[in-house]
Amino acid sequence: MESKSANYAQFFLRIALAFSFLSATADRFGFWGKSGESGVSWGNWQNFVNYSNTLNFFVPASIGEVLAIIATALEIILALFLILGFKTKFAAIISGLLLTAFAFLMSISVGIKAPFDYSVWTGAAACFLLSIFNNYKYSIDSLFKNR
């Protein structure tokens, strides 16, 4: 049985990771402000697609836009799974793989410093750490496990 502090820590980790994904996706749709404003990375969908195409330099732009849509959809779905604690281990592993892919692509396309500045490696490590828990006490998974 895991301690109360471990239960709280994994719950906090789930929520922090989920809201990090949601914040990034909100930026793509202009919810944090317009492009060029303080604290705004993209400010609109087209700026995000342009950035995504920079990371995915090895594919045609049309495929790059599809990859941007897939990444955004995955981030939203994974965030919801993490918030609810539904299929948590699976969501944590997929999130870790997604962030690791982002970190590698950022390193190759815009430089090794970028994924460190945006804590992408830290986020990936946090996802993999979350995946090692066997019980997610404050979650839908816990409700199903106890039945």
Image (cartoon, rainbow, N blue to C red):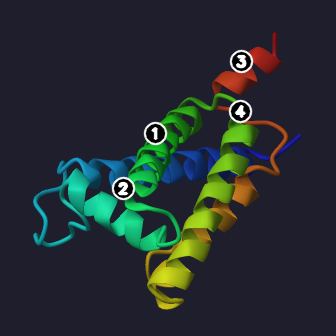
Q: Earlier in the sequence, mark 2 or mark 3?
A: 2
Callouts 1 and 2 close, C-beta under 8 Å: no
Q: Amino acid at mark 1?
A: Ala
Q: Earlier in the sequence, mark 3 or mark 1?
A: 1
As rendered, which of 129 and 34 lies closer to the eye?
Answer: 34
Callouts 3 and 4 close, C-beta under 8 Å: no
Give SS at disc 4.
loop
Callouts 4 and 1 close, C-beta under 8 Å: no
**CA separation in Å, label 1 and label 2:** 12 Å
Vertical comparison of 57 with 144: above or below: below
Please tell me in which quadrant of the rendered image residue 121 appears: bottom right
Q: Position of residue 136 (x, y in %)?
A: 73, 36
Q: Which residue is mark 1?
A: 73
Q: Residues within 10 Å of mark 3 (few under 14, many from 20)?
A: few
Q: Which residue is mark 3?
A: 143
Q: Amino acid at mark 2?
A: Ala
Q: Which residue is mark 2?
A: 24
Closest to the camera, between mark 2 and mark 3, is 2
Q: Tell whether 70 sits left or right of 25.
A: right
> On residue 86, which mark appears?
none
